[in-house]
Image (cartoon, rainbow, N blue to C red):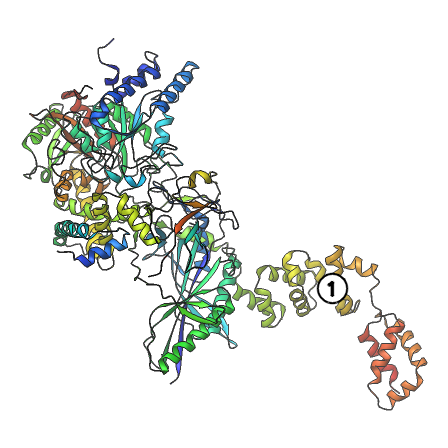
Amino acid sequence: MAITREEVLHVARLARLALPEAEAERLRGQLSAILDYVKQLDRLDTRDVVPTSHAVETGTPFRDDVVEPFGDREALLANAPDRQNDCFRVPRIIED
Amino acid sequence: MSNVPVHEWTLLEAARKVREKEISSRELTGAILARIEALDPKVHAYITVLPEAAAAQAAACDEEQAKGALRGPFHGVPIGLKDIFCTRGVRTTCGSRILRDFLPPYDACVTEKVLAAGAVVPGKHNMDEFAMGSSTETSFFGATRNPWDVSRIPGGSSGGTAAAVAAAMCFAGVGTDTGGSIRQPASLCGVVGVKPTYGRVSRYGMIAFASSLDQGGPITRTVADAAALLGVIAGYDRRDSTCVDIPVPDYLAAVERPVKGLRVGLPKEYYGGDGLSPEVRAAVEKALKALTDQGAVVVEVSLPHTEYALSTYYLIAPAEASSNLARYDGVRYGHRAEGASGLIEMMSRTRAEGFGDEVKRRIMIGTYALSAGYYDAFYGKAQKVRTLIRGDFAKAFEAADVLLTPTAPTPAFRLGEKTGDPLTMYLSDIYTIPCNLAGIPGISVPCGFSTEGLPIGAQLLSKSFREETLFTAAGAIERALPSRRVAPLEG
Amino acid sequence: MAFETVIGLEVHAQLSTRSKIFCACSTAFGASPNENTCPVCTGMPGVLPVLNRKAVECAIRTALATSCAVQPRSVFARKNYFYPDLPKAYQISQYELPIALGGHVDIEVDGGTKRIGITRIHMEEDAGKLVHEGEFAGAQASLADLNRCSVPLMEIVSEPDMRTPEEGGAYLRRLHDILVYLGVCDGNMEEGSFRCDANVSVRPVGQAAFGTKVELKNMNSYRNVEKALEHEIRRQVELIEDGGEVVQETRLWDVNAGVTVSMRRKEEAHDYRYFPDPDLLPLIVDESWVEELRATLPEMPAEKIARLGAQYGIPRYDAGILASTRALADFFEASAAIYGGNPKTTANECVHWKDAVLAGTLSPETIAHAVEDRERGTISATASKKLVELVLSTGKPFRTLRDEQGLTQVSDTSALDILVDKVLAASPKEVEGYRAGKAGLLSFFVGQVMKESRGKANPKMVQEVLKKKLVP
């Protein structure tokens, strides 16, 4: 099952991964091989099987609606590559 | 007074000797730090070593002990952490360039528990980048070497932890396991590794790879050590919605229990393939004999969907990973590409620069498997097959209390041997992956050496939340097949 | 060709919980940038979500109040996309299995009632805010404030049952009132705690298939929703009549220009790659919890309007105004309980003094006394208004002020007799004129009596006494 170059580029864009041409081609080959391998799952009839969407079978636990401030904004901003006025600064969004 | 060097003590021995004031934490920690300094240039098990902080922690432990206060069962004992557990104020990289300078503003639950037990953290262990790998060769910080043969890999992704423990560069460590990443390196490094039941150990602060599969667990030199360490890190944490509120039993007490009457299942699908090295098979058979000699009974069981486990895993894990790793976008922390003229370019180049090849490969597969038009065929399908695999184990555990299998198909391979083809590398995990898909616990315990002197491990699997059974069976194997647990590596 | 409009509305309501939906940060508005954040809502490595029970209760109560079926099992899903105001690069939402399905809201249009269906209600987390340096298109950089990240949202999707912008407005207002009644949302459209997007299409009358629908965004008031819909409908009809085709797209309402504008941004068909969030388990809601919450539901607007009309005999329109704010309706009933002799007047008074009522500076007793005194003729309407204003400014009780100010009017007939006799005696010419047929002179006499009594006479009664005495 070959994945096409267009599909590779499309997926890369969805995943925000810049891909130079050579790398895209190499990935295309590797991904095709992997996808070929996993196709074996088609051999199984799973029409009546319920997917395992959660690894634990109970219901999700709850929190009470109580405020517990983290209290250290500086620590949260400290790793920011670019910050201004206590905000995270990012390059402009270009509409193309 | 034994002739065993300080650094070779077991975790429990070290803890007892500190408690009984036979040695101070300062001395103990100093011995470990010296060992790291001497050996780690060769082994490269650590990404970050913390000599000053560890010495300070040790000093504090000694002072408290002088006043009669012991923090916990591992007071003053150096225990390392895979660099996937957030440690407040101490860089946590996950083996990746994208987090190379990341300083977490908080501690993982596992970190908190290890510290609360009184342990000293000597450093953060090397690992495959974002836990994706079976050899610790994908780490941005360079590969870790197997202490038994430094031309070989230690396994992965917790290769740094397993190597550190096997080289006596800490008394124990905590790793993580998503498809075998604790058990396989433990096996290849001749030490004990446990993947607990999914939901047994809190994932809060444990950097996520595949959320429905990841679990943190102990890597130690003895089964008893692993039981004790699991007892400390296991337990309910309200910050992790998938962490189960079930009491933590006394795992240590299980280690000495007899295995008479224990039903040991041998899943036939695990013993058939030509990928399984004859030496590994022979060693695992010795482990089986150790059990039956002590009264266990053998049953043959079948896990019919075993051959589909790898495919299932390599769709589910990358899919979850592709979503978990999307937050590394250069906005709030971590690496950011320079000179981008716009936002999309910044994010795309940040991630291209920050992630290694294996991570990118898995993000691509995962994104594809979830994408419009492909979800049902790939991710959706894999989730269904996962149900079938879980069903296999449920049925097998009607006939058996514990399953015995090889941990890895071969002993440690050489660096670079399998990096050329991703699928070849993925096959290292065929015996360990199914257990993660089912959520059940597993342990790898040393059971022999290859003719080249490379460690071989046997894997035991049990029902969910029955880790005690694993410790009982592994303890029995260990008593019958004592083996050297510290690699003969000198600085 | 005659066209029919089809409108569906999607409302995002911020829930009135103290803490966020998946972490314990405060949801309080107006904090300084990134003050109400923590590792969880800023998407740091290794963090995990834990669900706020109160948010779930808000959603369940909303579902009950709109007759939706609360689902015993619903699932949180990740909606994956990259944006600087979305720290995890996915929004935790609900996709295939939302918490509630299949309800309705009844609205009043053209003197009748129409039922608008609700397709589904689901829960999700809000994103942060991006502030662009300079004008949006020419901004060099943007600043992300993540305070709003993970504030709980409820998305309510209507069936495409509305046929006019007025119905859209009525639906929004009714839904708003329900949410405010329940206390689950403060309903502030301008501040963004109650947001609305619309889906609108047109089709020739009689055609069964829907036309191509356009999504409208950026409407921040009821009026703007209606105007945007009006404009968009016109645009689509004109487009089709000119031989064109409606393009499926998202358009923004430009309030200044009064037009909808296409989001010309390359809408790379967003592939959100939804999948169940593995960090959360299924949301299980059992019958007993639902019933427990059902018991806490207040009387809803529709029921209240009907009951106020029936119980107090007030017109539907008045009941509607009172019921538009629960506190106002409660005030009315409290006042009517103290004095219920003329509920319509009480209602009018409550509406007139609405701001003070809602500010809490007026008591039901004050209005009750005002209405009672007027009914009994103890004071005039003018005096009543003056006295309430004095209550507001001085805080003194109504009747205390009434007596202090000497505003009790004279309604006692014997006293009035004397006044009237005096005035009539002093104006014989006018008396003759009146008796000769100049009925307009009656107001002259009333004026004179009022003057004589220094404004204290009850004018209505004065009139009656005069009329009696003026009969030849």
Q: In which quarter of the view is residue C441 placed?
A: bottom right
Residue B142, x across and y down, in percent: 22, 34
Nearer to me, C457 or A20: A20
Q: The numbered mark 1 sits on a residue in which chain?
A: C
On the image, the x and y values in percent for residue C129 come to 44, 53
Q: Quarter of the image for the C terminus of chain B: give it.
A: top left
Q: Nearer the viewer, residue C52 or C2?
A: C2
Residue depicted at x 30% and y 56%: C272
Type of the residue with mark 1: Ala
Comparing C354 with C67, the one in front is: C354
Q: Is residue B424 left or right of residue B115?
A: left
Relative to residue B4, is residue C314 drawn left or right? right
**Residue C375 position within the rendered picture, expressed as x and y whole percent measured from the top left:** 75, 69
x%, y% of residue C458?
82, 72
As helix, strand or loop, the secondary structure at mark 1 comes to helix
Q: Which residue is mark 1?
A: C370
Q: Residue furthest top?
A: B1
Q: Quadrant of the N terminus of chain B?
A: top left
Is residue C80 visible in this depiction of the protein? no
- Residue occupying image coordinates x 62% and y 71%: C313
In this rendering, the count of numbered labels is: 1
